[in-house]
Structure formats: C-alpha cells, structure tokens
Image (cartoon, rainbow, N blue to C red):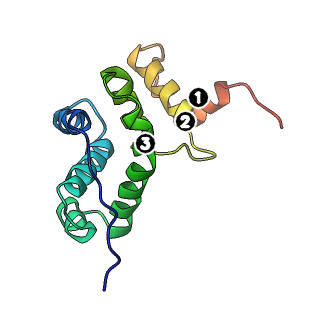
Amino acid sequence: MARPLSPLTLTTEQQELLETISRCREVPHSLIQRVHIVLSANAGRSNKTISQDTGLCEDTVGFWRKRWLVGCADLEKLAGKPKLLREAVSRLLADKPRPGSLTSVGFFIHNLQSRKRLRMPCSYQAVWAMLPVVRV
C-alpha cells in the first residue's frame, strides 16, 4: 500500500498567483510544470496521477510537493504582499544552483549576443577565455 500523502492546502492568494503563473508565457516551462504539480496536489490528486499527466516521474512530483510543504510556512508570512509573494514562490520552485554550472557564463553570452557586441558566433570557450582566472 502506498504511503499517505501530506495534505497540501493553498490560500486563495497563493492559488490565484499560481494560476496566473501557469498562464504566463514569459516564465520557464520547468516553473510552469512545478506550478501544475502544486495546483494538482492542492486539488487532492495523487503523485502517480500528477506524474502521468505531466510526464514527470513520481519521485520528481513528490520532491516538488515536499519542497512546497517545507516552504509553505514562509509564504504564509507574505500574505497581502503580492510582489514579495511572487518572488518567494519563484525562488521556492526554482532549481538550486549546481556547483560548477555555467549559469553566469551563459547569461554573459546571452547578453553579449543580444546586444550584438560580438560580430562572430560566440561559444562558451571563447567567453570562458575572456573571463578572469580565479585561483583557489
């Protein structure tokens, strides 16, 4: 028999915010998937059903459900502050930075290419060579 799921309840303000994020086209797809997980869990659906609907594995659905439950207490303190609540929800449902990731370098490349400061195609190696060397 499966373990019982922790109950997940949202305030009306949280639910409205999550529904707004789920309809937004400017947010990453991964954030929208996580919002759908939380909204479906709030509707009382099981991790297995949510995983079948989203195409994610049950462990992933359980991970994001658990992360929401852990961070939910902090979100309740932000009731009545929509901007702060949206930032907190985005942080809560965002990936944690991974050691050794090239996130800042990728952002650097994107900014250079979008401003057309480089006249040649840019690669991570070219940008990496331009960055100062930090020795530990």
| Dot in front, 3 or 2 | 3
Identify which amino acid the numbered label 1 is placed on.
Answer: Val
For mark 3, does the 10 Å Cα neighbourhood hold few (<14), some (14 to 19), or many (20 or more) residues?
A: few
Towards the viewer: 122 or 51: 51
Q: Which secondary structure lies at badge 2?
A: helix
- How far apart marks 2 and 1 lie (CA) works out to 5 Å
Towards the viewer: 38 or 132: 38
Q: Please state the total of marks drawn on the protein image.
A: 3
**Dot 1 or dot 3, earlier in sequence:** 3
Towards the viewer: 83 or 32: 83
Q: Are marks 2 and 1 in contact (CB under 8 Å)?
A: yes
For mark 1, does the 10 Å Cα neighbourhood hold few (<14), some (14 to 19), or many (20 or more) residues?
A: some
Q: Circle 1 sits on which residue? A: 127
**Dot 3 or dot 2, earlier in sequence:** 3
Quadrant of the drawing holding the C terminus? top right
Say above or below: 84 vs 91: above
Identify which amino acid the numbered label 3 is placed on.
Answer: Ala
Say above or below: 73 vs 84: below
Expressed as whole percent of the image width and height from the top left, the position of residue 52 reads 20, 67
**Left or right side of 81 for 136:** right
Q: Are marks 1 and 3 in contact (CB under 8 Å)?
A: no
- How far apart marks 3 and 2 lie (CA) works out to 40 Å
Classify residue 114 by image quadrant: top left
- Residue in view at x 65 percent, y 24 percent: 130
Q: Circle 3 sits on which residue? A: 73
